[in-house]
Amino acid sequence: MEKKDRILELIEKINQLNYHYYTLDQPLVSDGEYDKIYQELVKLEKETGIVMDQSPTQKVGGVILDKFKKHYHINRLYSQDKSQSYDELKAWIDRCQKIRLNYNRENPNDPLPELEFLLEYKFDGLTINLTYENGSLQTAATRGNGLVGEEVKPQVLTIESIPRTIADKSLMEIQGEAVMPLSSLEAYNKKYDIALKNARNAAAGAIRNLNTEETKKRNLAAYFYAMPTNDKNFKTEDELMDYLEELNIPTFPYRKLVSSYDQIIKELEFIKEQRKKIDVLTDGVVIKINDKKTQEVLGYTNKFPRWSIAYKYEAEEYTTTLLDVVWNVGRSGKVTPTAILEPVDFSGVTVKRATLNNYDDIQRKKVKIGSKVFIRRSNDVIPEILGVVDENQKGTKEIERPSKCPYCNSELIQGNVHIVCPNSISCTPQLQARMVHYCSRNAMDIEGISEKTIEQFMNDLSIKEIYDLYDLSYEDLISLEGFKEKKANNLLNNIEKSKECELKNFIYAIGIPNVGERTAKDLAEKFGSFENLRNASFNSLIEVEDIGEITANNIIDFFHDVNIKSSIDILLSKGIKIKTASKETSGDLKEKTFVITGTIENYKRDYIKDLIEKNGGKVTSAVSKNTDIVLCGNKPGSKKEKAQELNIQIYENDKLLDFIKKLEG
């Protein structure tokens, strides 16, 4: 028992030392002292055979995982709206202020406070979401599409600052960013032959590496800033951040409370230079309204919280030499130029390529092979060429406009803006890109098919159309390099599973020009069935929100193309069953406001939220006097108590399940 007690004592001590070293950057002991304490723990674990789950010796595994599993987040993880000018930032503040004032006029006895803002750094890494329950880390996942991510707990546990256990026993999700510090990047590149050029991609690649030993080599850090799921009823964002620190969850040491636009601008100007001195890549500042009740009133769009915005600093500009131009063919047949550059460093990222939109762009900017050019890297995507340093520079060479497709040698045609390869049937890049899109998560969601896999199918199995995927056999797959029995059967099962699909996913998957996920959803709700959409008139299409004349004509042309029509008919003949979408939501719950709390067995919160919204109801995150009904699962926490205090109706146990089943029909 003495040795077990000592083990527990050492675990607590080392976890505390790790917190001060990795999170606070305030080491309490020297490296030599730390090593002695750590080795004592290792020795005792070997002697006694007692190895606790929360032991720091168990934080890193060496197992190569078969694949990543899907993880369904309890609550949706949102993206972040952005501004790149002070005017845009001012407009956001004005919108928030207007909503606040309108609310206060309508609720004079329960007004919202004056706007106060919390400023935090915006980091370049990979979003991760931790789920704790009963004080233990249950899962760690990537953000994915906000609803579904990938389970990466073994990889995340290589980050020393993330605790396996916390003092809070309730169910909570904690969202943050996994990053590779610049010092870690530098150290890694000195030690290993294959250098990493980009700290952000290095972090993302490490988390998504199946070999956790490789992940550990990159010495990642993480900083957390949100709790999508909790039962704490925080009054402010600042209070939430204080609580994360109490739990020893790593947060970045900088955060600032301000109360006016002028104070925000002053702080942004300070950070503009200060950010270059920290050990993590950052391109901006996240600005959040501090008051939680105001956040609830402002709510969310489909993508972003209305109560926060990221200010992005102006893109940096550099000069370099244009070495060559290569022409690429996309999913729609557009032939676009990419500039090959003399490598240039952007804040620790080596850039070798840049965007040139089309041939007219090349001529307009007077760009030539050998030109010294201005380039700008904005929002950490591929840089853009702004123009040439000297139009009369000697030793340059004109960029020739291509006449034949660089892949299939077809004669190119000039579209309205872009040069286009008309060979949509057998031009390899077009087919490959269409197939990858069709199989993607938010389209038909065929797990196990990547760009590399499609390339294998095309080269080795002579696949020539999307519908050929549904004719693949076990014998076909097992003959391919890298395919064994389990992988082949899993892929065949996933392909078969994709035959049962939602209308919005199928519309998005088939690649109608200018029809993204949101428009596909709107079309599904408007027309209800695929046949109705195929036969839709111009006038009915432009009735859909955000669809103008150009997109309406694109949809009509798409469905009237003889080759496309034939391909879709063949695709449907493979057993695709498209669920009919409801044209309108029921009004049964109209003007009813719900809060969902606790864990509801066999149901995801987002599924219940969708059911409520389809029936005309509204779902909010916090209990208030405006809440009509609280749906309580297991371990509902303080939200149930608050509902009882306010005398709000509560559905739980059988009443809750009966309510959900009634909504399901």
Image: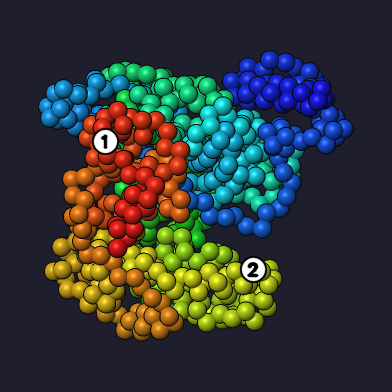
Nearest to the observer: residue 637 or residue 219 = 637
Q: Secondary structure at mark 1?
A: loop
Q: Position of residue 57 (x, y in %)?
A: 74, 34
Residue under numbered circle 2: 487
Against 285, residue 361 (above or below) is below
Report the residue that reaches farthest toward the top. Answer: 28
Residue drawn at the location 45% of the way across and 28% of the way down: 121
Residue 501 x %, y % = 40, 69
Residue sitting at 23 percent across and 75 percent down?
532
State which quarter of the image contains the C terminus: bottom left
- Label 2 vs 1, first from the N-terminus: 2
Q: Which numbered disc covers residue 640?
A: none
Which quadrant: the N terminus? top right
Q: Nearer the viewer, mark 2 or mark 1?
A: 1
Please state the horizontal and vertical placement of residue 165, each as a whole percent of the image: 61, 32
Relative image position of residue 438 (x, y in whole percent): 44, 68
**Label at residue 648:** 1
Q: Nearer the viewer, residue 487 or 609?
A: 609
Q: Residue at x 50, y 74 (%)?
A: 496
Structure colour scheme: rainbow
Q: Which amino acid is tagged 1?
A: Ile
Left or right: 505, with 151 as reference point: left
Q: Estimate how packed mark 2 is, as few (under 14), some (14 to 19) or many (20 or more) residues with alpha carbons within 10 Å.
A: some
Mark 1 Cα within 10 Å, few/some/many (few <14, many 20+)?
A: some
Give the answer, above or below, for where 218 lies relative to 509: above
